[in-house]
Amino acid sequence: MLPAAGQIKCTIQDGVAEVTLANPGKGNALSPSMRHDLSALWPKLAADGDVGVVIIGGEGDRHFCTGAELGAVAQNENAPLARDSARDHMSFTPHEFWKPVICAVNGLVAAAGLHFVADADIVVAAENVEFLDSHVNVGAVGAIENVGLLRRLPLGTVLQMTLMGRKFRLPAERAYNLGLVDVLAPVGGAVDAAREIAAVILENSPSAMALSKQAIWQSLDLSSEAATELGWALIRLQRSTPDYIEGARAFLERRTPRWSRLAPGEDAADG
């Protein structure tokens, strides 16, 4: 795992990996090194059989993540434009990461910080949190995160955030009512609430959760018929795993299931 002294901290305990954005002097803004370290971290967490759930949060209670570190952007004025794909750009987020991910939002979220909210499975936010998109304020295009937000927010709200920039802040309670936030927590309590949810999730079959998550997320880009076929294929795949029989036996025997763990590096969808 990454060293705890870096701007990305990762600790693993009792099946839960807690990933912390730790650049508090700059609002936990994403530096190039943070993006690089996150891109390297997600595959490691996917392959680690001791990790069942991931919680991602920000250091302190003032900021979750305020976007890209603009100092680094300004210094690259004459750098050639990157020709990477959107998939390459999104490698620092839990995109197509099939273990459960909980985003514990403890402070302000802006711009690139919205990636983590849009890509998480469950979003827990402290009741004093605000969400905003400042791309257009600094001459950047609000696109990848904003498209992701469309899966959780009404079109008009996403456009209002995008076009009004930092002058429009979406409060946590309003975000909860609209569906961006799944759980409201007391001020300072987002991580604790996320840990409680993680403990419940860990009771379930890792392979069943991975395939269920895949079925739901990938269905968003498919027709209804294609999504149904994908779901049926994943159901059949799970039936070939030990957990399928173990779950039924444990229920009938009134005992706690003894789930199998995915082997390091094994994607549930690969069988």
Image: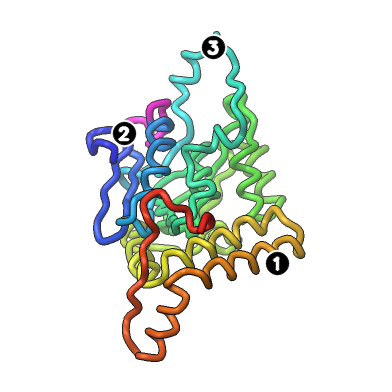
Dot 3 or dot 1: first in sequence order is 3
Few, some or many C-alpha atoms within 10 Å of disc 3 (few <14, some 14-19, many ≥20)?
few
Q: Is residue 221 visible?
A: yes
The circle drawn on residue 79 is 3
Question: Which span is picked out in magenta?
Answer: 25-33
Q: Is residue 85 above or below residue 208?
A: above
Dot 1 or dot 2: first in sequence order is 2
Few, some or many C-alpha atoms within 10 Å of disc 2 (few <14, some 14-19, many ≥20)?
many
Q: Is residue 106 visible?
A: no
Q: Position of residue 153 (x, y in %)?
A: 64, 55
Q: Amino acid at mark 3?
A: Ala
Few, some or many C-alpha atoms within 10 Å of disc 1 (few <14, some 14-19, many ≥20)?
some
What is the spatial separation of the Cα atoms under label 1 and label 2, in whole angstroms?
A: 41 Å
Dot 2 or dot 3: first in sequence order is 2
Residue holding disc 1 = 228
Q: Residue furthest top?
A: 78
Element type where label 2 sits in the image: loop
Q: Is residue 110 left or right of residue 232?
A: left
Q: Quadrant of the N terminus?
A: top left
**Residue drawn 38% across the image and 40% down it:** 41
Q: Amino acid at mark 1?
A: Thr
Element type where label 1 sits in the image: helix
Q: Are marks 3 and 1 in contact (CB under 8 Å)?
A: no
